[in-house]
């Protein structure tokens, strides 16, 4: 049992990574859509690259989207709308019409013809008006449209023009009276109709919509059948529209079949193997090329979480509507990882994620091509993310690449610009808008995972921050020293391609521990009297060495990120407090324990911390130069840095001798500028 516990303790980091991979694979595969995946990629207007394909079973040929749309449009155009004939309004209007008709034409002295004839004419005209009813002129349909007129339970097909319009009532009366013997009574008859002719035919939108939907639902989704054993397509044959529909129909039939439990288990095993392989490749890449990230389980967890986030978001959209898959701003992944780590890791992780999604998205080749190209553009274009303008410019470029690539694919497949779906362009624009949320997302990740991005580094580099202002007030000499070191370190980092912003911020905070005992450091002494004069060399060395531990303590209280605290830990490495060590040797005849005068480390472990160590030592020692010239400065820089190399201070840092020489060159040039050295002209 003890051996097991020891094994678990020694390998806890690797065990955690294995658990993380298993958990991530489980979550992804669990939510993957289950079903057989069609093994052929289908691209329209391209040669069929596979062997001759034969139908293994009978299956129907699906109609294309264009065919279905044409049928729907035709049904919508030919569909007869419904109108309701309200008999109640008609009966009441007729009764009131009769009453006033009898009142108007009941005096024989005013009538030149038979009274009954004019009443009969008016009544017949009223009945003719209401044969199909009276409607409001809505201009909803053309007048020659056949409509369904519903009178109670009876439905009659009539032309819309047969239903009289209220606006044309006068025209209807005038034409009827013109061809009669009653024109003398035109005003009275017109007045009767205006008083009692009520609209009684109304458009029934609900019934019309239900009827139309029923007709649309009855559209057959298929056109013919492919018989078992018949050849679908030959190798090298162009995938035209007809072949494309047969292949798409085969794919839909193949993926929609019900499979037994054994088949589903086989599918799940296949997904597990492929997804596990993808994550294994990612871990191997991180271990080989980003060992510092691999050793930090928090960072590995962060990378896996981001992959899960993008895959989960994509699965959610696929479940809702696969056509909207391009609305997912997948390029947030390389943007985020580049902000916290480096472009190479960001791009590699992006490619792995796209490959995983390629198992389940429709048109997988097109999807993977577009997303990988977009990821490459993201890595190449996005620089200095903390500058807002850069983000907007990069998002515009990424969206443009999406649109350009999609247009190219569709020109190949459709052979015509008119066939391209315009709504896909809107999806790419929405995806671009989604990329703008990367900044608040990065801020959230910083708080949750304790990481640091360039955005936070920029905030920390502000010398008006509370901590740096306190340093300037309590230890002005140290603050000035830190500014000089920051300038030297930034220039050196730019020269060798290191993170200049990170090393600058590290330089600003590397000596904050000196605030606690500022008077014991020479740059803060205001007189020629030193606070160390009354102390033993051991005590002085302890105070000097202790500024590192005090700095770490202050940094943690102020919630400075670990990447900045690393500069405080390592900026002296395991070097010797040489002055007090020599002083102790003089007092004790060389019988001195060197450990008491040596910093505890650790040594610098990356380029940035190594740069700071060199710049800090050179800047601090440069104050002792008297009458410096080019030769003295060159020799001075060489001596200090060569001594650090000799002491193997940069053994753990991934910095080369070539880069060290480049840093020396920068430091020499900067010191010459500081001391205003000029060429000596001959007399």
Image (tube, rainbow, N blue to C red):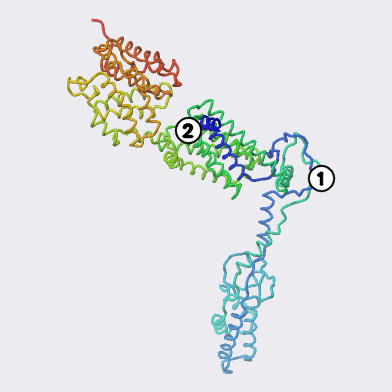
Q: Identify whether 484 is placed above or below 71.
A: above
Q: Nearer the viewer, residue 675 or 356?
A: 356
The quadrant of the picture occupied by the C terminus is top left
| Dot 1: element | loop
Of all residues, the one furthest to the top in this rendering is 683
Left or right: 625 in relation to 166: left
Instruction: Give the camera-side residue of 492 and 185.
Output: 492
Which one is earlier in the sequence, the residue at label 2 or at label 1? 1
Please give the residue where the numbered disc 2 appears in the rendered image.
338
Residue neighbourhood size for the residue with mark 2, other residues' Cα within 10 Å, grouped as few (<14), some (14–19), many (≥20): many
Q: Is residue 345 left or right of residue 408?
A: left
Viewer-nearest residue: 575 or 585: 585
Q: As drawn, which residue projects farthest toward the front?
A: 1
Q: Name the residue nearer the viewer: 617 or 587.
A: 587
Residue at x-position 27% and y-position 14%: 584
Circle 1 packing at 10 Å, graded few (<14), some (14-19), many (20+), is: few
Q: CA distance from mark 2 to mark 1?
A: 53 Å
Residue 611 image position (x, y, % from top left): 38, 22
The N terminus, quarter of image: top right
Residue 228: which numbered mark, if any? 1
Instruction: Place residue 527 in its image quadrant.
Output: top left
Disc 2 secondary structure class:
helix
Q: Residue 645's mark?
A: none
Residue 52 occupies quadrant: top right
Q: Give the percent coordinates (x, y) of residue 344.
A: 51, 29
**Foreground label between 2 and 1:** 2
**Where is residue 373 drawn, in percent x and y?**
56, 34
Question: Residue at the right extreme?
Answer: 229
Residue at x 37%, y 30% (from the top left corner): 565
How many circles with numbers are drawn on the protein?
Answer: 2
Q: Is the C-beta separation of discs 2 and 1 under 8 Å?
A: no
Q: Position of residue 535 (x, y in %)?
A: 22, 21
């Amino acid at each position: 049992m003890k051996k097991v516990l020891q094994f678990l303790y020694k390998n806890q980091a690797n065990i955690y990574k294995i658990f993380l991979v298993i958990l991530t694979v489980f979550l992804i595969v669990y939510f993957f859509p289950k079903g057989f995946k069609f093994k052929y990629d289908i691209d329209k207007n391209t040669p069929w690259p596979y062997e001759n394909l034969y139908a293994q079973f009978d299956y129907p040929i699906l109609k294309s989207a264009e065919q279905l749309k044409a049928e729907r449009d035709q049904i919508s155009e030919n569909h007869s709308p419904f109108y309701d004939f309200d008999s109640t309004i008609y009966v009441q209007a007729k009764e009131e019409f009769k009453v006033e008709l009898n009142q108007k034409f009941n005096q024989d002295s005013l009538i030149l013809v038979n009274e009954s004839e004019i009443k009969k004419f008016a009544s017949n005209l009223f009945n003719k008006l209401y044969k199909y009813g009276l409607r409001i002129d809505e201009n909803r349909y053309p007048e020659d449209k056949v409509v369904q007129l519903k009178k109670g339970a009876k439905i009659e097909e009539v032309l819309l023009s047969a239903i009289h319009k209220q606006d044309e009532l006068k025209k209807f009366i005038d034409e009827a009276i013109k061809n009669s013997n009653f024109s003398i009574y035109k005003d009275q008859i017109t007045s009767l109709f205006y008083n009692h002719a009520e609209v009684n035919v109304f458009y029934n939108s609900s019934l019309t919509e239900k009827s139309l939907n029923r007709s649309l639902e009855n559209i057959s989704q298929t056109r013919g059948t492919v018989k078992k054993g018949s050849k679908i397509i030959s190798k090298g044959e162009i995938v035209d529209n007809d072949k494309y529909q047969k292949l798409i129909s085969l794919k839909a039939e193949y993926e929609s079949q019900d499979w037994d439990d054994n088949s589903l288990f086989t599918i799940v095993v296949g997904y597990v193997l492929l997804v596990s392989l993808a994550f294994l490749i990612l871990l191997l890449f991180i271990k080989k090329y980003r060992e510092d990230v691999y050793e930090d389980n928090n960072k590995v967890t962060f990378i896996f979480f981001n992959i899960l986030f993008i895959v989960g978001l994509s699965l959610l959209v696929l479940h809702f509507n696969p056509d909207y898959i391009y609305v997912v701003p997948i390029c947030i992944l390389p943007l985020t990882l580049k902000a916290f780590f480096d472009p190479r890791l960001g791009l590699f992780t992006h490619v792995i994620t796209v490959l995983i999604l390629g198992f389940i998205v429709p048109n997988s080749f097109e999807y993977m091509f577009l997303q990988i190209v977009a990821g490459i553009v993201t890595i190449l274009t996005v620089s200095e993310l903390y500058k807002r303008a850069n983000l907007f410019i990069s998002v515009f470029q990424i969206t443009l690449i999406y649109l350009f690539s999609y247009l190219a694919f569709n020109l190949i497949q459709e052979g015509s610009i008119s066939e391209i779906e315009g709504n896909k362009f809107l999806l790419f624009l929405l995806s671009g808008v989604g990329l703008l949320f990367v900044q608040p997302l990065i801020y959230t990740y910083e708080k949750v995972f304790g990481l640091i991005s360039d955005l936070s580094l920029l905030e920390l580099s502000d010398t008006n921050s509370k901590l740096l202002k306190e340093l300037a007030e309590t230890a002005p000499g140290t603050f000035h020293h830190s500014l000089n070191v920051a300038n030297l370190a930034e220039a050196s980092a730019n020269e060798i391609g290191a993170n200049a912003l990170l090393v600058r911020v590290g330089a600003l905070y590397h000596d904050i521990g000196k605030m606690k005992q500022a008077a014991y450091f020479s740059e803060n002494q205001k007189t020629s009297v030193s606070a160390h004069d009354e102390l033993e060399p051991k005590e002085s060395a302890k105070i000097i060495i202790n500024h590192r531990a005090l700095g770490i303590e202050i940094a943690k209280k102020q919630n400075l990120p670990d990447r900045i605290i690393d500069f405080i830990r390592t900026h002296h490495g395991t070097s010797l407090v040489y002055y007090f060590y020599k002083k102790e040797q003089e007092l004790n005849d060389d019988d001195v324990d060197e450990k008491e005068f040596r910093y505890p480390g650790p040594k610098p472990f990356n380029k940035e911390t190594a740069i700071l160590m060199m710049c800090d030592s050179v800047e601090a020692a440069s104050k002792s130069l008297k009458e410096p010239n080019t030769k003295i400065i060159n020799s001075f820089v060489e001596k200090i840095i060569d001594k650090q190399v000799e002491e193997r201070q940069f053994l753990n840092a991934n910095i080369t001798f070539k880069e060290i020489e480049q840093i020396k060159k920068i430091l020499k040039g900067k010191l010459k500028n500081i001391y205003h050295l000029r060429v000596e002209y001959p007399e």
